[in-house]
Amino acid sequence: MRNTFFVVLLCLAVSGSCCAQSKQKYQTPNTYRGYKLGMTLTDFLSKNKNVESGGILWVLFSDLESEGMVFYKEKTKASSGDELEITYGFYNKKLAVISIDYKEYQSGRDILDMLKAKYGPPNDSYDSTMNDFIAGKENRLVQNVFWVSASFILNLNYVPDIGGTKITFADANVQKTIKAKLNQKNQQKLE
């Protein structure tokens, strides 16, 4: 009887340990390379001497807004050696957007799998098509995958057949503020 009790206790301990290990703690997508959404422009510029002033935020078929933002760009490389162009957007002198544009072909599926492992499963996605007049291709697929919460938005935007890939981190509260201002401005057009 005593041995049976210890065997049952051991089985419960092992199964509890397995369950605890299967619960994965995901990171919050609000930081990239040590730059956290909400940090001040002054702090950012003191830490990053490789940026140039200027630029715009452009993400295909995404609802991310950038009106009223000031942008800085950085050309750099990922630890993998891939060339990147990173756009940092500041709203009221606080970091509100970080957009990473891969300059060479990337497997969007591989990037998606990496983001899922780091940030958990996405909670929204949709596909769109575009006419690529430069390449002479109609109906080129563009995929957008989103991780959205009350405080952040993470968007993976990729074009599978040409490997165009962009990852954008955005402050959800700033996005709400900008959209409210744009809605108000648009409403005034109707009055």
Image (cartoon, rainbow, N blue to C red):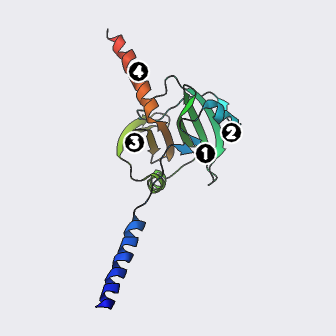
Total marks drawn?
4
Give the CA separation, mark 1 to mark 3. 21 Å
**Residue annotated with mark 4:** 182
| 142 or 33: nearer the viewer | 33
Q: Earlier in the sequence, mark 2 or mark 3?
A: 2
**Residue annotated with mark 1:** 34
Q: Quadrant of the C terminus?
A: top left
**Identity of the residue drawn at 54% across and 35% down:** 38
Label 3 is placed on what type of residue?
Answer: Val
What percent of the width, then of the height, locates residue 81? 64, 52
Q: Quadrant of the N terminus?
A: bottom left
Q: Earlier in the sequence, mark 4 or mark 1?
A: 1
User: How many C-alpha atoms fall within 10 Å of the one at disc 1: few (<14), some, or many (≥20)?
Assistant: few
**Residue annotated with mark 2:** 47
What percent of the width, then of the height, locates residue 55? 59, 28
| 191 or 127: nearer the viewer | 191
In the image, residue 152 above or below residue 188: below
Give the CA separation, mark 4 to mark 1. 31 Å
Q: Please state if 114 lies on the left or on the right of 23 as rendered.
A: right
Q: Earlier in the sequence, mark 4 or mark 3?
A: 3
User: How many C-alpha atoms fall within 10 Å of the one at disc 3: few (<14), some, or many (≥20)?
Assistant: some
**Residue annotated with mark 3:** 148
Q: Please state if 157 lies on the left or on the right of 94 as rendered.
A: left
Label 2 is placed on what type of residue?
Answer: Lys
Q: Secondary structure at mark 3?
A: strand
Mark 2 and mark 1 residues within 8 Å of each other at the beta carbon: yes
Label 4 is placed on what type of residue?
Answer: Leu
In the image, residue 6 above or below residue 84: below
